Image (cartoon, rainbow, N blue to C red):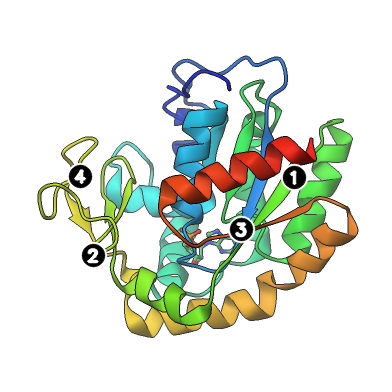
Amino acid sequence: MNPQNKNDRAAWLQGPSAACSMPGDLESPWRLVLLGAPGVGKGTQALLLSQRLGACHLSTGDVFRAPGGRPECEQTPAMTAAMQHMRRGELLPDSTVWEMVRERSGCLRCRGGFILDGFPRTLSQAEALKQHMESERLSLNAVVNYELPLDEIVSRLSGRRTCKQCKAVFHVTGQPPKSEGVCDHCGGPLYQREDDRPESVKVRMEAYERSTMPLIQFYSGLGLLLPVAATGSPDAICERTTAALAACV
Ligand code: AMP
C-alpha cells in the first residue's frame, strides 16, 4: 500500500486559492466515490482509506460545514443559505454543490488521488462529475457502496459525535473516545452535528432514498459499483473494502 496521507486538504476545505501541505504524487492514484445512506460510516471509512491508500478524503459536507467552524473561511450569503438547508437535513441545490466542486476541480486532478464522500448525491451531480472527468481524461477506479440495515443506521447516527477541529468521528457506545467529549487524535471538542438530531435524520433518510439510491443503478450500469457490507468494526470494514478494491482493479 502507499504511504500515509499527510495532506491537510487545504485546497478542498478552504478553497482553491489555499495551498495544500504535502500534496500527494502517486504513480497510480486512487480515484474513488463512496456511497451509502447517512450514518453508514462513509466518513470513517474515507479517513481510514485515505490513510491506507494515500488519497485525499474529499467530503462535500465538510466544506459546507467549514464556514461555521473555521474562522479563516469567508462566510458568503450562499454559504449562509447552504447552512440553513443543512441544519434541516435537506440536500443543497445541485447548482450550489457543483459550483463548489468545480471550483475545487484541482483536487480531482491531483496526483494524490481522491476519495469522494457525500458527492455525488443526485443523478445530476453524478452526470456532471462524469462529464467533467471525461473532459479531463480521468476515470474513477470504483464506486464503493456501503450496505447496512436501516435500524443499525439510525442507532449509528444518533450516537455519532464529530470532532470540531479534525472532523474525526466517534460513537458514544460503538467507538467512544478515550476521554468523554474530547477527540483522541487532536484533543479538539466533540459535538453532535445538528443534522444528526432525530428530526433531521428523518429528512436525510428520505432525501437519500429519493435522490441518492438511483446512483446505485447509475454506477452499476457503468460497471463501477462495488458493494461492501458495512457491518463490524471500522477496521474490519476497511479491510473488506481494500480487499474488494484489490480484487476489482
Ligand atoms: P454529509 O456530511 O455528507 O452528511 O453532508 C451534510 C449535509 O451537507 C447534507 O445533509 C446536505 O445538506 C449537504 N450536502 C453535502 N453534500 C451534498 C451534496 N452532494 N448534495 C447536496 N447536499 C449536500
| Badge 4 or badge 2: first in the primary sequence | 2
Amino acid type at image mark 3: Thr
Residue type for callout 2 = Thr
x and y, in percent, of residue 146 in the image: 60, 60
Which residue lies under the disc numbered 1?
A: 142
Of helix, strand and loop, which one carries label 1? strand
Camera-nearest label, 1 or 3:
1
Q: CA distance from mark 3 to mark 2?
A: 36 Å
Describe residue 39's horizontal placement relative to residue 216 as left or right.
left
The amino acid on which the numbered mark 4 sits, given as a three-letter code, is Cys
Which is nearer the N-term, disc 2 or disc 1?
1
Real-space Cα distance between discs 4 and 2?
A: 15 Å
3 or 2: tag closer to the N-terminus: 3
Q: Is residue 63 visible?
A: no
Q: CA distance from mark 2 to mark 1?
A: 32 Å
Q: Is residue 105 above or below residue 100?
A: above
Residue 75 placement (x, y as % from top left): 38, 50
Q: Who comes first in sequence, dot 1 or dot 4? A: 1
Badge number at residue 183: 4
- The N terminus lies in which quarter of the figure? top right
Left or right of residue 182, residue 195 in this image: right
